[in-house]
Image (tube, rainbow, N blue to C red):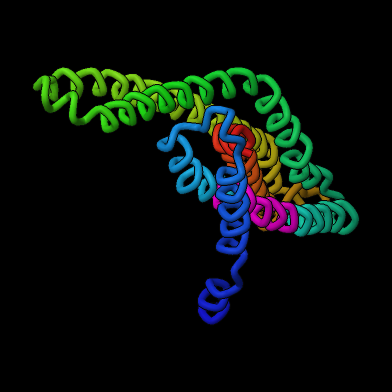
Amino acid sequence: THWLMYRRTTWKVTGGARAVMQENLLRKYLSQDEARSFAPTTFFLDSFGHDVGDLVVNGYNKLFAVAKSFGRLVCAFALTLFYAVEASMQKKVYLAFMGLLPFLALPIVIFIVLLVRRDKNLKALEAVQDAEDAMLTKVDKSTDCYRMVADMDTRTLVVSDCLQDIMSLNANLATFAGLMANNRSAVHWVTEALIFLWIAIAGHAVASSLNADEDSKEMDLGTFLAILNLIKSNGAEFENLSEVWLSLQTNYPSLWNLVMLM
């Protein structure tokens, strides 16, 4: 495992994707028609350095995380189904099929969250991007006009003016972070609800089976704990998948900037 972790740093997946995007972005910028206005230097440098890296690391590379989560969920579904079928055939325990609830409920919850919160997420992202663009534009103009600022001794005024844009950006970032925290919590709370439902229903069946005959037991403790752990692990995997999809949405501003420059 350690050897593979080391070797993957030489596979040039992230670096290769970043190099291709930066190469073509620079080529496009240098091939612009001089009759048209160029993008501000600060905007180009921010996109060339920050947006490209963000799009590769939090966008392209996340596709591998999605594939990994799907693979784990397929294996978990097969294992859960095996436990449920075995319990129903050998022990006549049909409650074990409740272990499949995460595969029914959580995809629906993720879809609803992404659908309902999409416009709000994009609006918050747009507010962050607008605030960042305004701040960079003002800082760019301040540095370009350094001689004038120095001659007129207005450094304090310029810094104070830029500080207002910095505070506005921080406020928008805080709002967006709170929004994303609520989005991520939706799947977690549904998972907790499923765990509570399993403990309430299957736990009662286990308690009722403690003093029952072997043939009349509704559920044994081993099956109860196995399904409980599967619900927890499957819920955690769906949480990871949901977080990956939500993080992909945060790449929209970087993608917009690169499309504008291209």
Q: Quadrant of the C terminus?
A: top right
Of the pair 154 and 129, the residue shown nearer to us: 154
Q: Which residue is at a point 52% across and 46% down the rendered structure image? A: 54
Q: Quadrant of the N terminus?
A: bottom right
Q: Which residue is at a point 11% across and 24% down the rendered structure image? A: 151
As drawn, is 70 to the left or to the right of 89? left
Q: Is residue 69 magenta?
A: yes
Q: Which residue is at a point 40% across and 36% down the rendered structure image? A: 42
Q: Main secondary structure of the magenta part?
A: helix
As drawn, is 60 to the left or to the right of 250? right
Q: Position of residue 114 (x, y in %)?
A: 67, 28
Q: Where is residue 22 in the image (x, y as percent from the top left)?
A: 56, 52
Eyeballing the image, is 143 above or below 159? Answer: below
Eyeballing the image, is 205 above or below 220? Answer: above
Of the pair 168 and 181, the residue shown nearer to us: 168
Q: Where is residue 32 in the image (x, y as percent from the top left)?
A: 60, 39
Say how many tags the image has.
Answer: 0
Q: Is residue 244 magenta?
A: no
Per the rendered image, the range of residues in magenta is: 57-72
